[in-house]
Image (tube, rainbow, N blue to C red):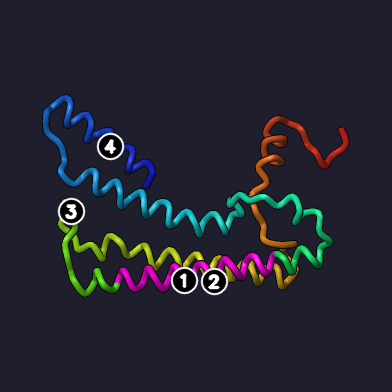
């Protein structure tokens, strides 16, 4: 989606400034593609533990307490996903019932916004998977990205290995 957005924007700029023409729908299409990219990325980031957060205090907790705090954090995230899913479904259903077309794209708006309920459903499922991993003991807590460790690793410094 990012590549498609970049290509479409590049072609639109060239068409507008070189040929004095362009695509009426390009800006709207780029906006919808960006929304799809972000909403798909939310659940993917949970899957690969790419969300960032401040967890310095969490990492200092004993493993059992860390698991409990992790389950509470995941539970709150699942609640958030459920609330967003409810709102997204309500919004999507209204758009579906009205059947209105997009401004510049000859498609119903509901088709273009279908990602809203789907993304929050998948996000919720990924969070449930994370909760199950914590319960099974496969994860110590709500796993987040560790940017500091990744930066040190990139620099060739291994903080957990003797130098």
Considering every residue shown, the one lying at the far top of the view is 18
Q: Residue at 81% across / 59% down in the picture?
A: 61
Considering only order in the chain, which callout, 4 or 2, is on the residue closer to the N terminus? Answer: 4
Q: How far apart are marks 2 and 1 (CA)?
A: 6 Å
Picture coordinates of residue 155, whole percent (x, y) = 70, 30
Which range is magenta?
Answer: 70-92
In the image, 44: left or right of 24?
Answer: right
Q: Main secondary structure of the magenta part?
A: helix
The stretch drawn in magenta includes residue 86? yes
Q: Distance between the residues labelled 1 and 3?
A: 29 Å
Q: How crowded is mark 4: few (under 14 residues within 10 Å), some or many (20 or more)?
A: some
Q: In the rendered structure, find residue 9 and report the number of the disc placed on it.
A: 4
Q: What element carries label 3?
A: loop
Residue underneath mark 1 = 83
Picture coordinates of residue 145, whole percent (x, y) = 64, 49
Residue 101's image quarter? Answer: bottom left
Residue underneath mark 2 = 79
Quadrant location of the C terminus in the rendered image: top right
User: Which of the two marks, 3 or 2, is nearer to us in this view?
Assistant: 2
Q: What element carries label 2?
A: helix
Q: Which of 154 and 73 is in front in this view?
A: 73
Q: How far apart are marks 3 and 4 (CA)?
A: 16 Å
């Amino acid at each position: 989606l990012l590549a498609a957005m970049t290509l479409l924007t590049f072609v639109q700029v060239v068409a507008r400034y070189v040929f004095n023409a362009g695509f009426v729908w390009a800006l709207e299409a780029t906006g919808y593609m960006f929304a799809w990219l972000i909403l798909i990325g939310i659940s993917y980031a949970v899957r690969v533990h790419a969300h960032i957060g401040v967890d310095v205090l969490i990492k200092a907790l004993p493993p059992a307490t860390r698991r409990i705090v992790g389950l509470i954090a995941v539970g709150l995230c699942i609640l958030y996903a459920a609330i967003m899913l409810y709102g997204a479904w309500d919004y999507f259903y209204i758009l579906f019932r009205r059947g209105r077309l997009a401004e510049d794209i000859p498609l119903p708006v509901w088709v273009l916004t279908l990602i809203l309920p789907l993304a929050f459903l998948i996000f919720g499922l990924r969070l449930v998977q994370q909760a199950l991993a914590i319960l099974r003991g496969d994860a110590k807590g709500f796993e987040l990205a560790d940017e500091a460790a990744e930066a040190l690793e990139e620099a060739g410094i291994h903080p957990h290995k003797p130098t």
